[in-house]
Image (cartoon, coloured by chain):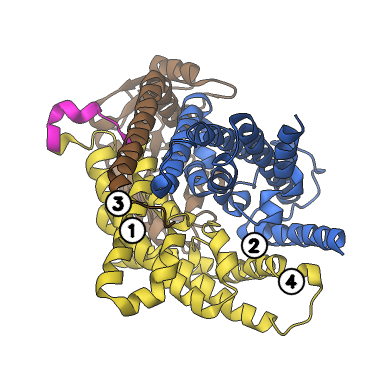
Chain colours: A blue, B yellow, C brown
Amino acid sequence: MSRLRDAFLDGLWRENPVFWQVLGICSALAVTTRVENALYMGAAVTVVAMGSNMMVSLLRRFIPRDVRLMVEMVIIAGFVALFDLYLKAFSYPMSQQLGPYVGLIVTNCIILGRTEAFALKNGVMESVADGLGNGLGYSAVLVVIAVIREVGGSGTFLGHQVLPAGAQPMRVLVAAPGAFIIMSLLAWAFQYMKEGRRV
Amino acid sequence: MSELLGIILAGVLTHNILLTGFLGMCSFIAISRDLRASLGLGLAVTFVATFTAGLNALIYNYFLAPGAMVWLLGDSARSIDLSFVSLIVFIAVIAGFVQVVEMVIQRWFPLLHGVLGIFLPLITVNCAILGVSLFMVIKGLTPFRATVYGFASGAGWALAIILMAAMRRRLDTSAMPRAFAGVPVTLLLTGLLAAAFSAFAGMEF
Amino acid sequence: MTEIESGNILKSLSFLGVVVLLTMGALAWTHTSWSKRILTNESASRHKAILEGVGVSTRGMDSNAIEYMFTKHFRSGSGGILRYTGPGGPLSCYPIRARGLWGPIEGWLIMEPDGHTIHSVVITHQEETPGLGAEVASPSFLARFRGRSIVYAGGRRLAVVKAGQARAEYEIDGISGATLTTRGFGQGLDSAMSMALKYGGSR
């Protein structure tokens, strides 16, 4: 049980992929103009990470070493395409909002990295826990950035007006430069904590 | 003609795939540490983006798009829609193309292999390349325009990483808080670069 | 990766092939079972804008309800024209197909029964640059057309001109910073107006 918990907690916090390893920030920056987008994107990454970790772990004794990267890519692409279909069928406006960024989960280094570094060497349950932890850790970062950007940049939270009507929202937060600057400040804070832990 | 110029200027300046689309950030942050490597990776991305966008557009427009196979199977194929496998096909084309290019330049162009060789494997997982193919579908581009768009996006990505590498050379000798060095300062500079590029937005073409 | 043995390459490739086939099979099966929902969603998202354009609110409606309202209130005529007969009607809707900088711009020119007054203009599809050309779909830009006549004295037609250069009464300001989008949209709108003049009047 503690191994499951470790696999989960490592992904969620102790080795949070976005901050400790700066992986997969493409979509973290692109889709976080609205909190709702970030929630769906986080769910997508979590589901795909769990699914592909599970499949790769199940097949780990059979996958030939020389084509294993290709096999992992195909499995990941399959799960991503599945999630894309799900959004189109059951949440069409959101699939329009996220557009190609759902497909781009395929190249999200986190997922390929986890199948390669974890699922190939560990049992099915641990791999699913690892995928869940990494996915939720990624989603948490996404949601934090999205809250800052949506509340600060549009004055809304999940589409509801939260800033008083007179307050002028900071448009730059929604634009591309704002995303980079927020991410930079958050990364600074995280690196500061990391340094503090080491010293 | 002015349309093609518009696609190129938009891809490089106003609609830069890295600075406004956030694609290819992982290798951007890792590689922009080194100017020479940035040049090499920039070239490789431009090269691969140009050709994979064209190839994927051909495959999409003639096989995968809804009703695309009418030319092959006649009117009965009007309802065939294979677009749900595009993602897997695009990834396979990109991986295959990179593999073939690597073998070809290793065999016949050793000089080029010296420049690009180590970067090619990095490219399969560069989201800018896949991003170009996915955006090309959404924009509904013809194979020719997709190739131009792929070239423009790749060149824009290369421009951004080369500019960033040049800036980061100065950072090596600047004093700053230890926790701010590395990723945070690179992201901040990227933000400023994106702000500077957004000034092109008022440009008329 | 020195463990690659040439004898195994065939085995490896067939393993890869099997994984690809299984994945595609699973996708094909899912796609077939969901395709009806997906098609309804796609067509409802196209019809939503035109319903809003003629003044039918689609707030909180799901795809099936939108499709129901659309088939209830609209009749299609020749040349892709739609006639609206619901509350606030009758109105005629003429398709706008324009070339933008990035791809097609599609929408509807919705005309009052008098045949020459614009009720509203809606955009159903555009891929222009956010903040620039994409303003073509913004309520503030489209509001400029509401209630304008499409014909003026001397046979002049309503025309979209470069941003800030509208002088005469038959001119409308385009989108600033997006000359190509403005030009393409203007041409598309002009052919829709030709249709409106040809088939115009109430029916």
Which part of the image, by quadrant, shows the C terminus of chain B? bottom left
| Circle 4/circle 2 CB separation < 8 Å | no
| Circle 2/circle 3 CB separation < 8 Å | no
Residue type pointed to by label 1:
Gln
Nearer the camera: disc 1 or disc 3: 3
Q: Nearer the viewer, residue A105 or B3?
A: A105
Residue labelled with disc 2: A177
Q: Mark 2 and mark 1: span between their CA atoms?
A: 35 Å
Q: Mark 4 and mark 1: span between their CA atoms?
A: 36 Å
Rate crowding at label 4 as few (under 14), some (14 to 19) or many (20 or more) other CA atoms within 10 Å: some
Q: Nearer the viewer, residue A155 or A93?
A: A93
Chain letter for the residue marked with disc 2 in the picture: A
Residue labelled with disc 1: B99
Q: Mark 1 and mark 3: span between their CA atoms?
A: 17 Å
- Residue C109 rendering spot, x and y as whole percentages: 39, 38
| Circle 2/circle 1 CB separation < 8 Å | no
The secondary structure type at the circle numbered 4 is: loop
The secondary structure type at the circle numbered 2 is: helix
Which disc is residue C6 wearing?
A: 3
